[in-house]
Image: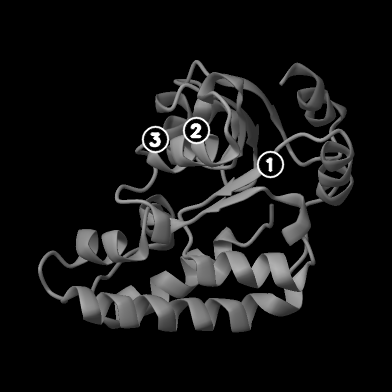
Amino acid sequence: MIDDMNYHITAWHRILNDLGATLSLERMKSECYGKNNELLERMFPGRFTEAEKDIMSLEKEKKYQEQFKPHLKLLPGLNEFLQKAYEHHIKMAIGSAAIMFNIDFVLDNLSLRHYFDALISADNVEKSKPDPETYLKCAAALGVQASDCIVFEDSPKGVESAQRAGMKAVVITLLHEAHEFSQFNNVLFCVNDYTDPTAKYSLLIN
């Protein structure tokens, strides 16, 4: 929905290296998936308690929001895409590895909350992407079959999550190129953003 991943990567890169991780930006990019606490545990197994990780996670998100807010905007064409889907009574959900604190940050600052029938965040699942739990909970909350869902994703881990949930996916190529998704059989097509006419076609094939 928004092009903010570089802000997350930069924030984590600074925090983790300050803690002694010595990560390159490219390595940090590959590690930015799943829940914040899972990321911290991958980098520093057993070093922090869950309470300590919760505190570090929230502080990281506060810094991210402060840095990103002046640049907060929807991807090109997405506002029109959401409005068209809404007018056609297509049920929509957000299924994110972000905590609800960040989802609220986007929805409220961009006045988008009315578009979505369900919100599933990292706070609502036991296992984050690439596990299918996030998207299966989205389908359940919407009252629809997983096979009738189309997921819009910008990361290989997210597309894997959709595939394991039995859902088709449209790839938005922000940080990743189309060839990085070639191993998945659930990808309908790849687009740069929602101005691509192909993205609008997905409203008809659901």
Which of labels 3 and 1 is toward the front?
1
Residue under numbered circle 2: 159
Left or right: where does residue 122 sit relative to residue 69?
left
Marks 2 and 1, how far apart in space? 17 Å
Q: Are the residues flagged by discs 3 and 1 in contact, CB closer than 8 Å?
A: no
Q: Are the residues flagged by discs 2 and 1 in contact, CB closer than 8 Å?
A: no
**Nearest to N terminus: mark 2 or mark 1:** 1
The residue lying at 40 percent from left, 52 percent from top is: 33
Q: Which mark is residue 132?
A: 3
For the residue pair 140 and 20, the one nearer the viewer reads as 140
What amino acid type is highlighted by mark number 2? Val
Q: Look at the image and tell me in which quarter the C terminus lies.
A: top right
Q: Residue 92 carries which label?
A: 1
Task: Tell which residue pokes out farthest to the left in this image.
Answer: 46
Which of labels 2 and 3 is toward the front?
3
Residue 148 visible in rendering: yes
Q: Give the class, few, some or many, for how many residues have Cα within 10 Å of label 2's Cα (few <14, many ≥20).
A: many
Q: Give the class, few, some or many, for how many residues have Cα within 10 Å of label 3's Cα (few <14, many ≥20).
A: many
**Nearest to N terminus: mark 3 or mark 1:** 1
The residue lying at 56 percent from left, 69 percent from top is: 102
Residue 198 at x, y percent in the picture: 81, 25
Q: What element carries label 1?
A: loop
For the residue pair 110 and 66, the one nearer the viewer reads as 110
Left or right: where does residue 102 sit relative to residue 54?
right
Q: Are the residues flagged by discs 2 and 3 in contact, CB closer than 8 Å?
A: no
What amino acid type is highlighted by mark number 1? Met
Which of labels 2 and 1 is toward the front?
1
